[in-house]
Amino acid sequence: MTNEIKKPLILITNDDGDTANGIEVLTQLMMQIGDVIVMAPDGPRSAQSNALTVTHPIRFKKLEEREGLIRYSCTGTPTDCVKLALNEVLDRKPDLLVSGINHGSNAAINVIYSGTMGAVLEGCENGILSIGFSIVDHSLNADFSYFKSYVLQITRSALANGLPYGVCLNVNSPCGEIKGIRVSRQCVGHWDKEFAKRTDPQGRSYFWLTGHFENHEPEALDTDEWALANGYISVVPTKIDLTAYDMIETVAKWGL
């Protein structure tokens, strides 16, 4: 009698919504690796970070079920999606959580705003191997073809090697042909001129979020921004612990 090999259980979400091309591509790729449960927002939830819905009820519904795949749509945020899946849908903890493929970069400081990475951090906090995938292309019809094999390579390597509790991966891809993978650090930078001011027909001001990313270390060769600018995929090991350990003794000396 042979023992049946159990496939990994993979939870997928995103912040672009359940009909985005990126999550469709990611779902098809993950079905090559394991059994897939998708719980995604029912519309765009970009820049939601790890926000939770607390002012009104959350609902979800099943969209599809077939061999190896069940898809749900949720009215909440990406983090809501993860929490609902873990608490109300799945009968066991998933072996892997993947989020994306996001339309647009989540490199550098974008990691703290990203709903894609908010979901990844929620999985990480729950002790699940978690990876966020993004591409530097905001268009609805972004070309993921060059990225696909790397998504599989990175995912299989993470499953084979694992990560310690509290560490997840933030993976970003350039557009077009890819030179390879660079394990990188998060680039230091900030967003400047973040709002475009306009005037409505009644003469009242309103604002659109926009902005330009200022790279504070453009010559550094070990950052995610350098990797992307030079045709490489960046893989940044990311921690949920935000403690600045090197400052504990300094702050303690303030006499607080």
Image (cartoon, grey):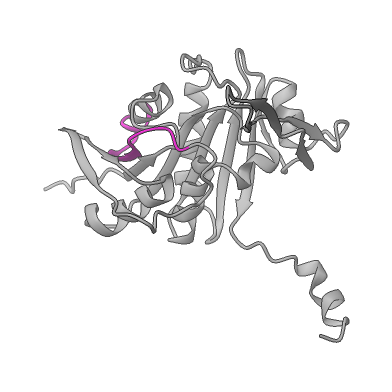
Q: Residue at x 75, y 32 (%)?
A: 213
Q: Residue 223: x, y in percent?
A: 76, 37
Task: State the image quarter where residue 249 is shown.
Answer: bottom right
Task: State the image quarter where residue 110 is shown.
Answer: top right
Q: Residue 35: x, y in percent?
A: 26, 39
Q: Residue furthest left?
A: 1
Q: Residue 215: x, y in percent?
A: 81, 34
Q: Residue at x 40, y 21 (%)?
A: 21
Q: Nearer the viewer, residue 112 or 163?
A: 112
Residue 245 falls left or right of residue 92: right
Q: Residue 34: x, y in percent?
A: 30, 38
Task: State the image quarter where residue 105 is shown.
Answer: top right
The quadrant of the image that shows the C terminus is bottom right
Q: Residue at x 51, y 52 (%)?
A: 121
Q: Is 132 placed above or below 146 here? A: below
Disc count in the image? 0
The stretch drawn in magenta includes residue 209? no
Q: Residue furthest front?
A: 202
Q: Nearer the viewer, residue 159 or 131?
A: 131
Q: Residue furthest bottom?
A: 255
Q: Is 17 placed above or below 95 here? A: above
Residue 38 falls left or right of residue 21: left
The stretch drawn in magenta includes residue 43? yes
- Which residues are drawn in magenta? 29-45
Q: Residue at x 49, y 18 (%)?
A: 144
